[in-house]
Amino acid sequence: MSDPAKAIRIGTMISASNGEAAERIGQIADLGFESFEPFFWQTTNGQDLAELGKRCRDAIGDRDITISTLGMFGNPLEDEPLDRDTMQGWIDCIDNAHHFGADTVAGFTGRIRGRPLEDSLPRYKEVWSELARRAADKGVKIAFENCAMDGNWQTGDWNIAHNPDAWELIFNETPDDNIGLEWEPCHQLVYLIDPMPQIRKWADKIFHVHGKDATVRHDVIREHGIFGKHPFVFMRTPGFGDSNWTDIISELRLAGYTGSIDIEGWHDPVYRDALEMTGQVHALNHLKSCRGGDFVDETTAYGGGDPSIQ
């Protein structure tokens, strides 16, 4: 029988901006990852995404690995050249997601730069209402990552979907069923928000999950506050941070989430550079353990008998 543990798969993100996605997948496909999220930073650089999708799937071959989500990270609400590239990238990812086997495209909402968050809402509604319709026609969901990119409510450059109060605003502007979140606990811990209640409240809007964590230095906060010279929080690879991933995955299961948790590396201050893949594989195994470990077929365990009979 199929492995029901893999109703939630554990994978990683793969950079795709410069045409390297298929090769990177081939290089690490045997390390135990169950899914990949190819992602673009601001631009696809004019790549043929249909052809890239085929090469990514060819790199996976007959392995039990999926690509459920593509990432397109930039600011599609503004009008600089790279912003226009990001907008075109969203269109291309939506139109070509099926070539990867994906049904979700994720990224930032964009933002009117340097303005309070509410000032972005009219442009947000204009852009994302149209993209939501396009995505719905393709059977694709749109998921916004909950990262502020160093912005806040008053100002920022990239994203307005970084705060639960903002989610209320944007989902009111775009009540489309296929617009939701690419959620992770890291960014909530960075803002000193308890991430756990969010799963229960926003479960129907969580379309994809990033495997990224954070360590909050409460002793630094007590002594120096959050605006001093000493860092009060670090982004971490899962298994090295504060989050209880057993609880997170249990809550996701209880909420009916099926999809991937794709590790977002390249942020951990310790497991980076030469230790990057060491940290990612540790995170992979940690998350699999938090998911319950290896699947045990109950019927087989009981020798083919009915386990419900006492």
Image (cartoon, helix red, strand yellow):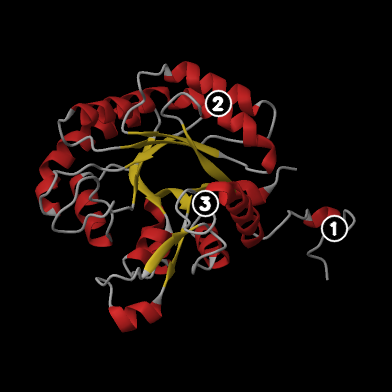
3D distance between C-alphas at marks 3 and 2: 22 Å
Report helix, strand or loop for mark 1: helix
Residue at the disc numbered 2: 22
The mark that comes first in sequence, 1 or 3, is 3
Q: Is residue 67 left or right of residue 110?
A: right
Tell me the number on the disc at residue 215: none
Tell me the number on the disc at residue 301: 1
Q: Amino acid at mark 2?
A: Ala
Quarter occupied by the C terminus: bottom right
Residue at the disc numbered 3: 272
Report helix, strand or loop for mark 3: loop
Q: Residues within 10 Å of mark 1 (few under 14, many from 20)?
A: few
Residue 29 percent coordinates (x, y): 65, 35
Q: Which marked residue is nearer to the observer: mark 2 or mark 1?
A: 2
Specify the quadrant of the image occupied by residue 27: top right
Give the total of numbered labels: 3
Q: Which marked residue is nearer to the observer: mark 3 or mark 2?
A: 3
3D distance between C-alphas at marks 1 and 3: 41 Å
Q: Which marked residue is nearer to the observer: mark 1 or mark 3?
A: 3
3D distance between C-alphas at marks 2 and 1: 39 Å
